[in-house]
Image: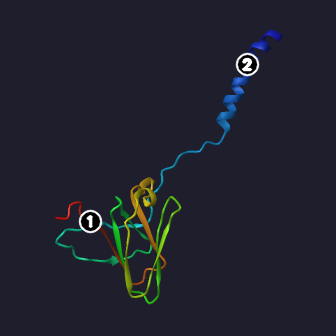
Amino acid sequence: MLKATKTLAPLLGVFLVVLALMLLPVAVPRAIAADAHVLITATQTTSSGVTRTLAAADAAGNKFANDGRVWLDIANGYSTTITVTVASPQALTKTVAIAAGSGKLIGPFRPYVYNQTGDDEGRVFVDYSQITSVTLAAFKPASNQN
């Protein structure tokens, strides 16, 4: 009986380790869901010019594809100053105050600082302190302005 116990002891040890590993909670990777920010598309500029067409800012925020050459044109038609926040996964979030009745060009945005990851990889998130009478557009210069 003693001999059988000595040969079973290592097997019992292995069995207990495997059992313990099976009972440990396992972190299941989850996909990062796409964010609720509303996508806007940058207008490519030309040497002939483009029409400046601004759209209403979205309450969920906006996002745009960024290659490091995109600029935002944001107009504040509201009666008080608003704050525009450009999120950064690198904890380098940019905040810009826009006075009532004025506008600002903001950008460009360095991809390694402002581009998101996951389902929104390559996009920049923009949020507003309020959206009443706030409009915006994204512009991207053409690579060759002849």
Amino acid at the residue labelled 1:
Pro
State the separation of the CA atoms marked 2 and 1: 70 Å
Secondary structure found at label 1: loop
Amino acid at the residue labelled 2:
Pro
Q: Position of residue 124 (x, y in %)?
A: 41, 63
Q: Residue at x 45, y 53 (%)?
A: 118
Relative placement, left or right, of 97 versus 7 is: left
Q: Earlier in the sequence, mark 2 or mark 1?
A: 2
Q: In this picture, is 113 found above or below 103?
A: above
Q: Position of residue 144 (x, y in %)?
A: 20, 61
Q: Is residue 91 visible?
A: yes
Q: Nearer the viewer, residue 131 or 143?
A: 143
In which quadrant will I find the N terminus?
A: top right
Q: Tell me the crowding category of disc 1: few under 14, some 14 to 19, or many 20 or more residues within 10 angstroms, Cα based.
A: some
Q: Is residue 75 visible?
A: no
Q: Residue at x 68, y 31 (%)?
A: 19
- Rendered image: mark on residue 10: 2
Quick one: which residue is furthest to the bottom in this view?
Answer: 79
Q: Residue at x 73, y 22 (%)?
A: 12
Q: Residue at x 59, y 45 (%)?
A: 27
Q: Quadrant of residue 20?
A: top right
Q: Position of residue 35 (x, y in %)?
A: 45, 62
Q: Position of residue 4 (x, y in %)?
A: 78, 11
Q: Quadrant of residue 70?
A: bottom left
**Circle 1 residue:** 141
Secondary structure found at label 2: helix
- Rendered image: mark on residue 104: none
Relative placement, left or right, of 113 versus 42 is: right
In which quadrant will I find the C terminus?
A: bottom left
Q: Nearer the viewer, residue 9 or 124?
A: 124
Q: Quadrant of residue 9?
A: top right
